[in-house]
Image (cartoon, rainbow, N blue to C red):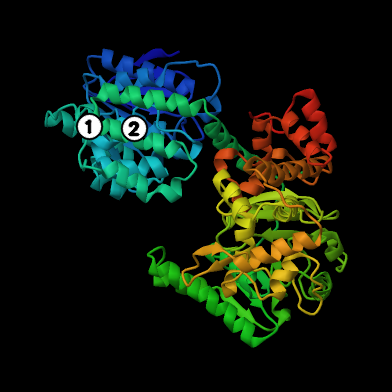
Amino acid sequence: MYRLLLRCNSDDWGDAEMTAINAVTDLTTDGELGVITIDSPPVNALSADVRDGLAGAMAAAVADDAVKAIVLICAGRTFIAGADISEFGKPPRGAALHDVQARIENSPKPVVAAIHGTALGGGLEVALVAHYRVAVLSAKFGLPEVKLGLLPGAGGTQRLPRVVGARKALEMVTTGTPIGAKAAAEFGLIDAIVDDLRAGAIHFARRVLAENLPLHRVRDKPVLGVEEGMFDAYRRAQAKTFRGFEAPEANIQCIEAAATLPFDEGMAVERRLFMGLMTGLQSKAQRYVFFAERQANKVDGLDPDAPLLPVKSVGVIGAGTMGGGIAMNFLNAGVPVTIVETRQEALDRGVATIRRNYDNTAAKGRMTAADVDTRMGLLTPTLDMGALKDADLVIEAVFENMDLKKDIFGRLDGIAKPGAILASNTSYLNVDEIAAATSRPDHVLGLHFFSPANVMRLLEVVRGAKTDGQVLATAMATAKTIGKVAVVSGVCHGFIGNRMLEQRQRQAMALIVEGALPEQVDRVLFDFGFPMGPFQMSDLAGLDIGWSAETSKGETIRDRLCEAGLRGQKNGRGFYDYDAQRNRTPSPVAEKIILDYAAEKGVNRREVSDAEILERCLYPMVNEGAKILEEKMAQRASDIDIVWINGYGWPVYRGGPMFWADSVGLAKVAEALGRYGIAPAALLARLAAEGKSFTGAV
């Protein structure tokens, strides 16, 4: 896999230069030092070629008597950024990572890892087998495997606590959050911070030789900072955060093993738990989601190299909860925003809310007072829609009323400059009808943000029948700029997410009439992994959204709840009663309304099982997802899953509704739908009959 070249009497080198080469690895000599350079763009991932090259270069460096110490460094923008996850689940090839690590760790010559960019996952695990580590100030270090439903499988859980201590290791492996070079130096993860990476690492290696410093093998160190009961205490403290996930607990068990067992026995625990996660459904789901998020940004029919429209200034119409949240996304990205309202009181209230949100963030130490002032300085509040004449992108975020939106877009058409993108934040309405109110439907689309808009990651980008490709591409790129996960939807009622949500809500309401109660339905969906069930969600949003006392006819349970003054959390009474801390208990008033409604409709209530609740709430969603795919309202099943994970709290470890349906089995889903009187969508029925799946990922 590599060959040796000996170049002598070079003009560039005072000493002989030896190069061990495969496609991605290079070994040169600098005096008594061997410098191994990995160059495998874009992120030097630990592919088979990288592992082979590193093994060969180490062997050559150790065999060369002229080499007294070794520096391991990477070309490009980063150190080894982690494993090559495209190899996961495929037949193994190339040198095993553990064998490569053993070559480094057991080297009789000191090895110094020189780190820049990110040393993540397998990259940090390689660095941990070096005898010393130096880094530039901007470097980041972490073990993010938990985010893929895994644990570090190359000794990371056993070596990290021997360097940074048990408590910090617990935090790093269970959250996957990286730390910077300063923190790494404080915790002893690196031995020095250097200005110039190569020169600094070489200088450090020469100091190791000059001072005859020992070979520090991390595996030989004890785990520090172990306290009685600390692991169970950590479990209790993080129980809410880790609910439903298997990987955090496995990571905790590994750190516990490092603290209580000899190194090799701890490695055996790590390997056993790693393989259990690797072959389990949760990790498959989380790895699927990882790739699905990246796939969602690839839009059919768009040239990825086509030029984008400029988005250097943004207008937002409406300073309410949504409008203010939308504005904050752009202010955070350094984009000036002009926000428009019709009344001074509403405008002042909206600006004050934005300022309060930023002040709260600053109070938590997540930004400085200067950061707050900078963001607020980019905001221009006004009552004059004419102030939007120079905006590159204008987003309407007013009440969900078609006549109102069409009126705004008609007026905006006469104000906005040629080439400006006009977007509606509608969550249900027909974007083509809105676009028809302008003379430029090719520059109109939907940008459906999710509440709170400055927090939620999802952005549904609604492609109208006449939306220009350049406009759509610019919207997708803009989403990335403001930190959103964007998914393209076609024009249909509710688009992707709300269209499917409607099916769940319909079944949930039917279930409480037939015999279940709101708390049972909510519990089943909470236990499945949602942050809350449909009735708790309704109370949080407000039962009276879109409801009018003047037009209410008492025909639905919601009508009757609202007529009885039950509005949800906002007044402490809804499907649940709420105390001052918003703790909830089932509402006797709501229950009586439900029972009276069922009796009035002649329903003979029955006991409803948890299994039926889960199937009836979720299978119709899957069925609607199949219809969305049939109608080409979504490009791919994985896009639907990304919508539900990032916008509606679908548990990531279940991979989204379409992936989950594949894991259940489409034949089972289709059969159950028929049993509940729901006709399976044509696509679902066909795939079930053929033994196929939506995603091909299970």
450, above or below 523, in the image? below
Look at the numbered disc 1 and give the secondary structure of its residue: helix
**Mark 1 crowd level (few <14, some 14–19, many ≥20, 10 Å Cα):** many
Q: Quadrant of residue 684?
A: top right
Q: Position of residue 94 (x, y in %)?
A: 47, 15
Give the structural element (helix, strand or loop) at label 2. helix
Q: Residue at x 16, y 28 (%)?
A: 209
On the question of residue 273 being in view, the answer is: yes
Which residue corresponds to mark 1? 205
**Disc assigned to residue 175:** none
Q: Whole-percent x and y of residue 241?
A: 45, 49
| The quadrant where residue 413 appears | bottom right
Q: Tag count in the figure?
A: 2
Q: Position of residue 387 (x, y in %)?
A: 69, 79
Q: State the image quarter where residue 669 is shown.
A: top right
- Relative side of 279 to 441, left or right: left
> Residue 10: image x %, image y %?
33, 22
In the rendered view, tell whether residue 364 sits above or below residue 36: below
Residue at the farthest left position: 211
The three-letter amino acid code for the residue at tag 2 is Cys
Q: Which residue is mark 2?
A: 254
Query: Against 157, is 493 above or below?
Result: below
| Residue ID at (65%, 51%) | 486
Work out which quarter of the rendered image holds the N terminus and state it.
top left
Q: Residue at x 45, y 29 (%)?
A: 39
Crowding near pointer 2: few (<14 within 10 Å), some, many (20+)?
many
Who is closer to the viewer here, 491 or 442?
491
* Frontmost residue, 165 versus 541: 541
Q: Residue at x 32, y 15 (%)?
A: 59
Sequence-first disc among 1 and 2: 1
